[in-house]
Amino acid sequence: MKKNKKNINPIWGSNFNKQSNPLLEKINSSIDFDKRLALQDIKVSEVHSLMLQKKRIISSSEYKLILKGLKKIKALILNNKFEFNKKYEDIHMNIEMELHNLIGEAAEKLHTARSRNDQVVTDFKLWIIQATKEICSKITDLQKTIVKKSSLHIKTIMPGFTHLQSAQIVSLAHHLMAYYEMLKRDKGRFLDSINRMNECPLGSAALAGTSFNIDRGFTSKKLGFKKPTSNSMDSVSDRDYALEFLSNIAICGSHLSRFGEDITIWASDQFKFVNLSDDFSTGSSIMPQKKNPDSAELIRGKMGRFSGNFFSLLTTIKGLPLTYSKDLQEDKEPVFDSYDNLVLALEVSNGIIKGIKINKKEMLKACNKNNLMATDLADWLVINYNLPFRKAYKMIAGIISIANKKNCQINDLTTIELNIAGNDSGKKIKKFLKIDNSINYKQSSGSTSPKEVKKNIQIAKRELY
């Protein structure tokens, strides 16, 4: 191969004779999306150069020049005055080339004892750790709104559903607090994942470590990691932290999707349980009477992105040999996309709950249909008449059959028709079949009884404040 006399590529082109095909530049460049790692990359370079100076791998004057240059670049980026160039492929080389323009030859020493391979993993981990904390903050905001709304509706009753069929009567607060619990688990997963990614890859270099006498413990501590990673090959090829981040987003997104589904159903003309505020609703281009719950539907629709992004990266990684392959450049776009959309979905969910109006009358009306106290009455018979539950179940099925023939509810039946257990049980049953008794008689921990709902709201407030 002839000696390269052209500036084929300022990064790696010294042994090439032809300019890169424009298509290669297009597919190879990641600067359009990995520029989001700019501040993390600068932080890593600042710490790395400080370590190099402390280990006397570079001089104090070189370190000061590098630090001064990095601070200027940071200011340019924060003020949106930095020019990102595709020719330099990624955020790492864009910053390094600008640093060379600012301080000259000293910039060339910054890459001593590191590779873009360990550099990008360190940057990406730092970004995901910060993003995880921001997501947890948004989850907390949503939980606070749920608790506040729930506190107002402890005794607001509505049908609870199984198979989307009216099943039993529940407190609206109890229903909303179910989402609090889901989000609590989501937040726990996100925070727990930080423990697993809290190891610093910097110093692993390309894959085998470095011949320089570096101090990885120092850089780990300065960057906020618990400790350095243990295996340089694993360090540069590991994307578990990104997969776990995407998995956690997908699980959280599934909970928000279920919330979006509930709101969409509740806001429908067939239910009329809630009215969405106008600022989180849309209209129709041809039907002037329409008020559409697009905000809730779009939250539900985001789940396609969340699951797709997770499986996209999982598929990319599953067949890669150790260690680094350029396929791993495909890790960032799904992560950034899922993060952006989860934060948006959390914020929109928060806005929906804050502005939603509850139609208590429609919820109560729905509770007076479909014999929703049937199970409560069966339990009452077991408790008060010492009957086997299956026998009580059959007895209730019998009076439901009578009510169905009369096109009424069991609480509309006469005391004689309700006298299924003898000894004036009809009068006692008639008295029991008051709609509020459905939640008031519940005793089990975690149930929909006002006492239990209040208790769990208080626990939630202690957890949040």
Image (spheres, rainbow, N blue to C red):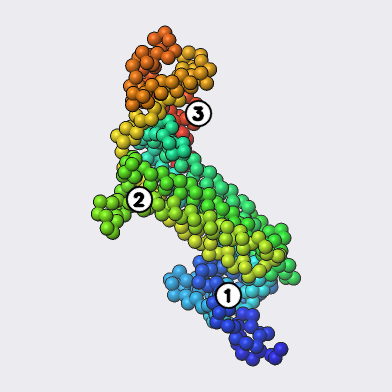
| Residue that appears at 48% across and 77% down | 83
Residue 129 — which label? Answer: none
Q: Residues within 10 Å of mark 3 (few under 14, many from 20)?
A: few
Q: Which residue is mark 3?
A: 445
Q: Is residue 449 visible?
A: yes
Q: Secondary structure at mark 3?
A: loop
Is 430 located above or below residue 126 in the figure?
Answer: above
Ranked by sequence position, the earlier of labels 3 and 2 is: 2
- Quarter that holds the N terminus: bottom right
In the rendered structure, which amino acid carries the disc numbered 3? Ser
Q: Secondary structure at mark 1?
A: helix
In the rendered structure, which amino acid carries the disc numbered 1? Asn
Q: Is residue 31 left or right of residue 346?
A: right
Depth check: give the residue in front, 160 or 328: 160
Kindly report which numbered mark, 3 or 2, lies closer to the viewer in this rendering. 2
Residue 28 — which label? Answer: 1
Q: Is residue 47 visible?
A: no
Q: Position of residue 441 (x, y in %)?
A: 43, 23
Ranked by sequence position, the earlier of labels 2 and 1 is: 1
Ranked by sequence position, the earlier of labels 1 and 3 is: 1
| Residue that appears at 67% across and 73% down | 112
Q: Position of residue 229 (x, y in %)?
A: 68, 59
User: How far apart, in angstroms, are the residues tagged by discs 2 and 1?
Assistant: 41 Å
| Residue that appears at 33% across and 21% down | 412
